[in-house]
Amino acid sequence: KLDSFPSDFLWGSASAAYQVEGAWDEDGKGESVWDKFVKIPGKTFKGTTGEVAVDHYHRYKEDVQLMAEQGLKAYRFSISWPRIIPDGNGEVNEAGIKFYEDLIDELLANEIEPVVTLYHWDLPQALQDEYLGWEGRQIINDFTRYCEIVFKRFKDKVKYWVTLNEQNVFISHGYLAASHPPNVKDPKRMLQANHHANLANAKAIKLFHELDIEGQIGPSFAYGPTYAFDADPKNQLAAENREEINANFWMDIYVYGRYPKVAWKYFEDNGIAPTIEVGDFDLLKEGKPDFLGLNYYQTATVKENRLDGVGAGKPNYTGEKGSTEESGMPGLYKEVSNPYVEYTNWDWAIDPSGLRIAMRRMTSRYDLPILITENGLGEYDRLEADGRIHDEYRINYIRDHIVAIQEAITDGVEVIGYCTWSYTDLLSWLNGYQKRYGFVYVDRDESNEKELKRYKKDSYFWYKKVIETNGQE
Ligand code: BGP
């Protein structure tokens, strides 16, 4: 028999500033690295940008109304750092603070718990120009100062805080794949930027605890557990390699303030380990999170990889099924497709068991509560003539993942809540607007010309029942 969801379980949904707000240069907002990056030809799907996005900046009341009608318990959104401090470390922009204050008040008035992400990738461009952003050690203090300003303004209203969203994604896409800003391919620079992100994360958490704020804080990590393709010991070792490099290396530092030895040795042997300064590990140990945020989309299946074998392949950014290029890390592992699971049109494995496995592994290794900060299905949706969107594939996906969470709870995992990705449809960083995740359909395409009218999808009504029955639907 399965355990029930706790009565205060946060049934939520999520978004991020750049992907929904639009108003990219309004009311004193500074330029972010994404505002600049999307203008580089060929970097995003058909050159799409978040300049208008789904205009949440002007329509947040309408969006919150939809949430309230649905009975949503929590809404995770991110604060845009350059809206609060346009140049990253100078004057505070009161108009930026006001936007988030109004949004938070609107949520609270409707009994929706705000879950605030402090950094969902839109770094102030001025800091990139001044000292190369995450590559400069000054980012540690600048990020902490920005967090302090936001903590002090909203500490009486916000109980759940996420520091960095998917550090593994913004760092590796930004510095290895060059598919995110700052558009670099250099593993050494990547690991240095990553070390600073770890320090910034720890320092912000330490400060949060020193300020004695009533609430909880932690980073959100994109964790997709690894399976070995089969029982061939070589493939089993490949799976170990991927877990060490793609999971332990990122999460151990958050919780234990140390890099795991095998990963560290590999980076050292390859001459790419970051420079560590005296006191760094002390700070890292003092910034232990209260919970771990988990963004779960899919698992990876691997085989051994030759030293001269495949490297970073090209992911599917077109929505043409099967167009992902083989990828891996030479000498360590290569990703192969899993014959036991289905794949989306963007070649993402649909694997609810992987969520249960992720939660169990995180609990056994880190023993912290988990807040699922993202999970969802990116698909093509069709708006019918009668204004309906029949997205039963999304309902099935979310239902199966909710069952996996319930099983994980039964296994002994502590879960605070579940935020689907995403609330409304929104910009997919590299896939434009055709790849949709929301409960609420937004009528727009790659141009900025549409009215952005909102429609409730079938999944909207279904999730409403899930919330009403505390997960029994
Ligand atoms: C996560 C990000 C989100 C969101 C999601 C879906 O990595 O935190 O911001 O974009 O993935 O990804 P995509 O838009 O590439 O389908």
Image (spheres, rainbow, N blue to C red):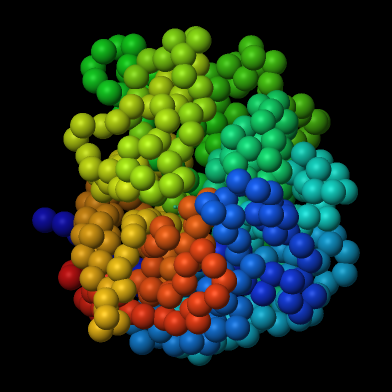
Closer to the camera, 212 or 295?
295
- Quick one: quadrant of the C terminus? bottom left
Could you tell me which residue is drawn at 41 percent across and 22 percent down? Answer: 334
Q: Is residue 383 visible?
A: yes
Q: Is residue 198 visible?
A: no
Apparent side of residue 460 relative to residue 428 in the rendered image (left or right): left
Please say if 185 is above or below 99: above
Could you tell me which residue is drawn at 62 percent across and 20 percent down? Answer: 267
Could you tell me which residue is drawn at 76 percent across and 58 percent down? Answer: 124
Please say if 435 is above or below 298: below
Q: Quadrant of residue 414?
A: bottom left
Apparent side of residue 307 relative to residue 464 in the rendered image (left or right): right
Closer to the camera, 219 or 30?
30
Please say if 295 is above or below 326: below
Q: Quadrant of residue 215?
A: bottom right
The furthest residue to the left: 1
Closer to the camera, 435 or 114?
435
Could you tell me which residue is drawn at 23 percent across and 43 percent down? Answer: 342
Q: Residue 314's x, y, as percent?
A: 48, 34
Q: Residue 214's x, y, as percent?
A: 59, 70
- Quick one: quadrant of the N terminus? bottom left
The furthest residue to the bottom: 109
Apparent side of residue 70 relative to residue 353 in the rendered image (left or right): right
Q: Residue 130's x, y, as percent?
A: 88, 48
Query: How many discs mark residues in the rendered view?
Result: 0
